[in-house]
Image (cartoon, rainbow, N blue to C red):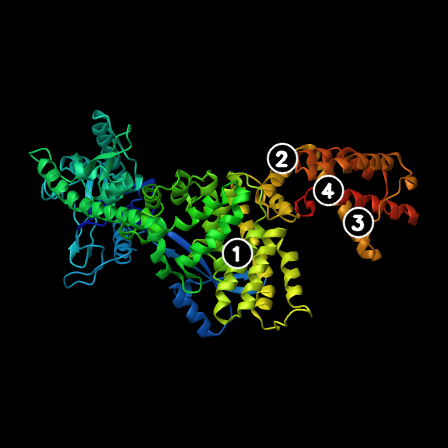
Amino acid sequence: MPDLLIELFSEEIPARMQARAADDLKKRMTDGLVEAGLTYASAAGFSTPRRLALTVEGLLGESPTVKEERKGPKVGAPDKAIEGFLRGAGVARENLEERETHKGAVYFATITKPGRPAAEIIAEVLEDVIRNFPWPKSMRWGAGSLRWVRPLHSVLCILSDEGGAEVVPFEIDGITAGDQTRGHRFMGPDTFSVTSFEDYTAKLKRAHVVLDASERADHIWQDATNMAFAQGLEVVEDRGLLAEVAGLVEWPVVLMGEIGEDFLRLPPEVLQTSMKEHQKFFSVRNPKTGRIEKFVTVANRETADQGATILAGNQKVLAARLSDAKFFWENDVRAVHEAGLEGMAAPLANVTFHNKLGSQADRIARIESLARALAPVTGADADEAALAARVVKADLSSEMVYEFPELQGIMARYYALEAGLSPAVADACRDHYSPLGPSDDVPSDPVAVTVALADKLDTLAGFWAIDEKPTGSKDPYALRRAALGVTRLILTNNLAMNLDRFIDAQLVLHKIELNAPDAKDAEIKALRDILDEIADHGVFGAAFRTVIDKLDGEDEPDTGDGSLLRSVGDAVPDISTDLLAFFHDRLKVFLRDQGIRHDVIDACIAMPGNDDLALLVKRAEALEAFLRTEDGENLLQGFKRANNILTQAEEKDGVEYSFGADLKFAEDDAEKALFAALAEAEPRIEAAMETQDFAGAMSALAGLRSSVDGFFEAVQVNAENEVLRRNRLNLLSQIRKACLAVADLRRVEG
């Protein structure tokens, strides 16, 4: 079986496109070959800045002959139908075969497709792959019609086996395939021939080209870390930058350069970001001080002066870039010293956050209000949390963040320290965006946690208030990430908080701002009074409705059905319920990743207090553990049996059996044992639930298992005696009530 080698040689391919292009070449070629009947043993794709390569081993020399049987029209069908079938099958009428089927005699045709040489198939598939290659961006050049990411110079395409190598006859847009390639642009020979993939990689390496991108990356990282270690330093790890730099060079030469003394006082994140974004340099850090002191660059060639000229040029360009960063830093620090961090934030009043949600300053005011309300829950000082909320976005108006948006939050921390604010406020400035993803660190300082929660909750409430929710895979405002962030903040810090209270208060705030231009002062004041009521009661529904009823009562001025007050009163509860359901969806995803079953989560979400996410998770974990035990499995079956019998009886009789069973009507010992077990378990369950001891409640439930099993084995619930039947149905109701006090087991799969 021959091996196939393909190389598509072009001008430099952007680094960000190379890995995907190598995968696309491999997938599209191998899929096309297999579809045409050519199977293979293995395949691998490679990329460098100037070439895509594919090796396919163990390829069939030719596609197999295939016979296909095709069913035609019935014997005696109209001639036009038969002729159409003959044309489609490509056979003559005399080659048709008549066969008897359950529907009568039918024509059948046997179509033979002879095998084709591998070279012929490869040429067809390769042309289709090249002409329809899925580059993110492509170009035409010269007079041809071919589009490629950069001008395509040559195609190498050979089949090789023990007898040697042959060029696959192939031509596209004036480019004829051959067995030749080129080495390094500066250090390699112009062209050379190859006979196999092994010969290809060996000659490329001699021509100063490392074909494998992972090998280039490993070489860069090893040389860089060795150089840094020799000077008592360490390279700041950046896997994304490493992959990008490996895609910029075919023959990596690692060089370490100096950073000017004037720039060493800049925050390390500024140095790192500036060097990465503008120059693709790695930062080299002093582990003792945390300062960035040097940089590593990767050249694409060896030089007689060991890279001295290259380094000199890089250091000159870097000095210009860092001079800009130094200018931004000094201007920002001067502004902080003159006006304070709140003064730096003042221009945000003219920056729109969203055209329906107001400016960044409006948003900051809402976050401050919410941070004060959250402070008692998180254990933060309310004044400190409010101060942090006022300044955490200040760096959005700084020159440094305007130049490097990825430094927002990080720079706010430095500016807060320059302004003399406490470390807790400074850390909140840096951490309030966290967590940004499922593996990101979660803040633990109370002030940072408070502001991070307030920021995310306000964002979610705002977009729900204007009905801009995620749909399908679209989530332009990263609201799923925000909800997961709230969930992780609550769970990681074990915060006991009722989300509904804070969601509802924030929704009212948004409704006030959305309707304020058309509202009366009295209505605005009434809505702000509602916020105070919510804060006092901690439960939205009752407080909200109480205030509305009071303000719409006979003794108060009539606000009318079309008032702002009534429109908010009608809208907010539904929006609040929908937003809480969104949190539950994010929590389900999070807990499923922790190994908790979806039906267990649903059983806990169905219980009262489901807006306390920490409590909900504790309940779910306890229920999951309980259901893994033999007692848990058996009790679940007993509960389902009791619930099914009871539900059917209630539907049939049109009454609810929930008035308590009486021991005096118990006849069987198993029945009496169940009365005794319930009498012992119910107070234990109630006491455990009051203290949120879910494990204790599950343990009390487990004590019912044997009595429930014994009851169903010995007792006929639907007895002929109506008194006994009603009493036993009421007893089943006690079982259901005891189980449902812990979790809604009706939602758990049997």
Label 3: element kind: helix
Q: Nearer the viewer, residue 250 or 172?
A: 250
Q: Is residue 560 left or right of residue 218?
A: right
Judging by the rendered image, the residue that carries numbered circle 2 is 625
Judging by the rendered image, the residue that carries numbered circle 4 is 739
534 above or below 717?
below
Q: Earlier in the sequence, mark 4 or mark 2?
A: 2
Q: Residue at x 76, y 45 (%)?
A: 737
Judging by the rendered image, the residue that carries numbered circle 1 is 506
Q: For marks 4 and 2, give the CA distance.
A: 15 Å
Nearer to us of marks 4 and 1 is 1
Judging by the rendered image, the residue that carries numbered circle 3 is 646
Q: Is residue 552 left or right of residue 63?
A: right
Q: Earlier in the sequence, mark 3 or mark 2?
A: 2
Q: Residues within 10 Å of mark 3 (few under 14, many from 20)?
A: many
Nearer to us of marks 3 and 1 is 1
Q: Residues within 10 Å of mark 2 (few under 14, many from 20)?
A: few
Q: For marks 3 and 2, give the CA distance.
A: 27 Å
Q: Residue at x 54, y 50 (%)?
A: 583
Q: Earlier in the sequence, mark 4 or mark 3?
A: 3
Label 1: element kind: helix
Q: For marks 4 and 1, give the CA distance.
A: 36 Å
Image coordinates for residue 193, horizontal then vertical, percent? 14, 42
Q: Is residue 311 left or right of residue 701?
A: left
Label 2: element kind: helix
Q: Quadrant of residue 124?
A: bottom left
Determine whether label 3 and label 1 are within 8 Å by CB: no
